[in-house]
Amino acid sequence: TQMHNDIGGMPHFAPDGSTFIVIFEDSFAIGSVAANPPSLTRTEWTTDANDGDFWEFQAWLDNDHVALKFSGRSAVCPDGNCEAVLAHVGNNWILQRQRKS
């Protein structure tokens, strides 16, 4: 579809098909198909990505939770390769990082 060109990356859709995430190596965005054409609804993520660090889509856990992986190091994950969950809470999306299990 043309969506790939319009939003700047390949969308990964939630199970209900109405919400999607797009990964841009060192950042990511949440989008919605509620509007025509589909659009990004949350585009500004503050991440501590350095050159060479990247985000990787893992899976939608349900319609409100996305599993991600981050290659960089942080206070939560000093060894790198952190796991994270992006959670939809109310009207917000909250990034919850955790050490790799």
Image: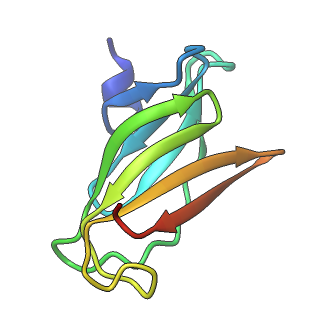
Q: Residue furthest front?
A: 101
Please identify the quarter of the rendering in which residue 47 is found: bottom left
Apparent side of residue 66 relative to residue 1 in the rendered image (left or right)? right
Query: Residue at point 40% right, 40% down?
Result: 22
Residue 10 at x, y percent in the picture? 31, 31
The percent coordinates of residue 78 (x first, y second) are: 32, 86
What's the residue at 57%, 62% (across, down)? 96
Q: Quadrant of residue 27?
A: bottom left
Q: Is residue 12 left or right of residue 62?
A: left
How many marks the image carries: the answer is: 0
Scheme of colours in the image: rainbow
From what the image shows, is residue 25 above or below residue 76? above
Look at the picture and state if 31 lies above or below 74.
above
Give me the residue at 31% from left, 37% from top: 9
Compare residues 48 and 24 and report the one nearer the observer: 48
Instruction: Look at 63% across and 48% down and name the residue there.
Output: 87
| Residue 28, percent from left and from top | 43, 52
Foreground residue, 76 or 2?
76
Residue 38, placed above or below residue 95: above
State which quarter of the image contains the N terminus: top left
**79 is higher (above) or lower (below) than 40:** below
Q: In the drawing, does residue 73 fall left or right of residue 51?
A: right
Q: Quadrant of the C terminus?
A: bottom left
**Residue ranking furthest to the right:** 90
The image position of residue 50, as x and y in percent, is 27, 80
Q: Using the image as rendered, state which of residue 55 and residue 51 is in the foreground.
A: 55
